[in-house]
Amino acid sequence: MQASRARLFKEYKEVQREKVADPDIQLVCDDTNIFKWTALIKGPSETPYEGGVFQLAFAVPEQYPLQPPQVRFLTKIFHPNVHFKTGEICLDILKTAWSPAWTLQSVCRAIIALMAHPEADSPLNCDSGNLLRSGDLRGYQSMARMYTKLAAMPKKG
Amino acid sequence: MAQIIFLMQEPLSVLSEEYQTGSPILLEKIQVLSESYAAIRRTRGDGNCFFRSFMFSYLEHILESQDKAEVDRITANIEQCKKTLQSLGYADFTFEDFFALFLEQLENVLQGNESSISHEDLVQRSRDQSVSDYVVMFFRFVTSGEIRRRSEFFEPFILGLSNTTVEQFCKTSVEPMGEESDHVHIIALSDALGVPIRVMYLDRSSCDAEGVSVNHHDFIPTVGDVQNTTSKGVSDSVKPFITLLYRPSHYDILYPKN
C-alpha cells in the first residue's frame, strides 16, 4: 500500500513533466484518491478514431506496480478489443504481460497503439472483430468513425 | 491455501520420498546427488522459483560468510545494471524501488549494524510475499537489462526459444512476474551480477555406460564484456557458491555436504 502510493506519487510528478512531450495524452489523478486516475487520449491519425477524444478510467490496485491497473474506456468506442458496453480493454500488458516497467503514461500509449492496430483475432466486440476478419475494412471503419463522431467529438451547435 | 514461498531446509531424503513410486533412474540420480549434497530447500512453483531460489541462496551465503568484499563487488555491479537500464531508456522510478529493496536486504544480512538480521529473520523475510516479489522484480529488471544490452549475443538463443525479437522476449518472458526462467535468464543474471551459479539437472536424460550420473552446468560470469563461459571452459578456479536443483520447469536450492 505504502509502496504503491509512493510509486504513484512519482508517476504523478513525471506526468506533470511529460505534459508537453506527449500532447496526445492528458493523465489526471483524482483530487482525493491517488489510486483513481482518468486520462483523455486523442484518437490516432489516419484511423477512424482521428479527431476524437477518448476518456479512460484507471483503478489502481494496492499491489501496484506488481499488478496492473484496471483500465477501461468511459467513452463509447467501436473497436474489436474493447467491450462495447463496459469499455473493458483486451490488451496483454494489462493482464499476463504486465510488468512494473510499464507506467500509467506508457499504458495510455499502448492503448493508442491498440486503437491504430486492432487485433481482430481476440475480439471483445465480436461485431467489430467479424467485420475485420471477413475483410470488410470499409464497414468497420464507417462504424468506428460513426461512433467516434457520436461519442468522442464535441457536439456542434 | 496459498503454498508457502520457501519450505524448511530438509534432508535430501525428502526427494527420494517424492519419487518413491516414480522412475528408478530418478531415484538412482538422487542417490548420486546425496553423495555430494546434504539438504534441499524447496520453493513454490509459481514461475518465479529460479529468482526466489537465487535470492535466498545468495543472501544466505552472504549472511553466513560475511564476505564484505563480495558485497562491495556486487554493489558495484548493481550500480552498473542501473546505468544499463537508464541507457536503455527506462525511467528511474520504474525500477529504483526494486533495486533499493534488494540493496537493503544485502545490507541487512551483514552483521554489526542496527538493522542486521538473523538467519531466522532472513527466512521470514523471504517468505514475505511483498519482499520476495520485489526482489524477484529486481532480478527481472537486471536480467532484462543485460539481455537487451547484449542483444546480439542473446539473439540466437532467443530465436531458438521463442521466435521473437529480443525486445519482445524481454517484455513478455523476462519482465512480467511468473514467467519461467530458461538458460537465457540464468546466463544474463549471472553475468550482470557477476555471480556464478551451478545447476544440477534431475531429469530422465540417459546416462553413459559407466552408470548413473547427474548432469550439471556451471554458469560462470567472466569479468568485462566477455560472454558467459561454461563448465567446459577454463574457469575451473571459480566455484559457484549457489547450487540449484533443476527438475523440468522448477528450481530448488541444494546444500552441499561440508
Image (cartoon, coloured by chain):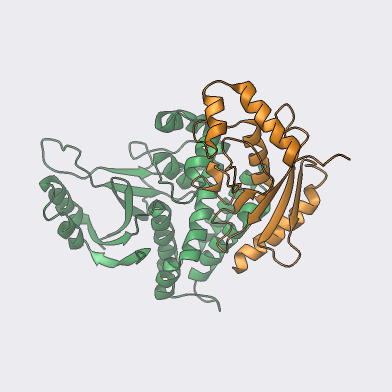
Image quadrant holding the N terminus of chain B, namely: bottom left
Residue at position x 32%, y 66% in the image: B7
Q: Which chain is orange?
A: A
Q: Is residue B57 visible?
A: yes
User: Farthest bottom residue?
Assistant: B114
B22 left or right of A110?
A: left
Instruction: Examine the rendered structure and indicate whether residue B182 appears above or below residue B134.
Output: above
Across and down, in percent, residue B35 comes to 18, 56
Which image quadrant is residue A54 in? top right
B221 or A49: nearer the viewer: A49
Residue at position x 37%, y 47% in the image: B237
B193 or B30: nearer the viewer: B30
Instruction: Examine the rendered structure and indicate whether residue A142 appears above or below residue B235.
Output: above
Q: Which chain is green?
A: B
Q: Is residue A42 visible?
A: no
Across and down, in percent, residue B62 comes to 44, 64
Which image quadrant is residue B225 in? top right
B124 left or right of B149?
A: left
Across and down, in percent, residue A5 comes to 65, 65
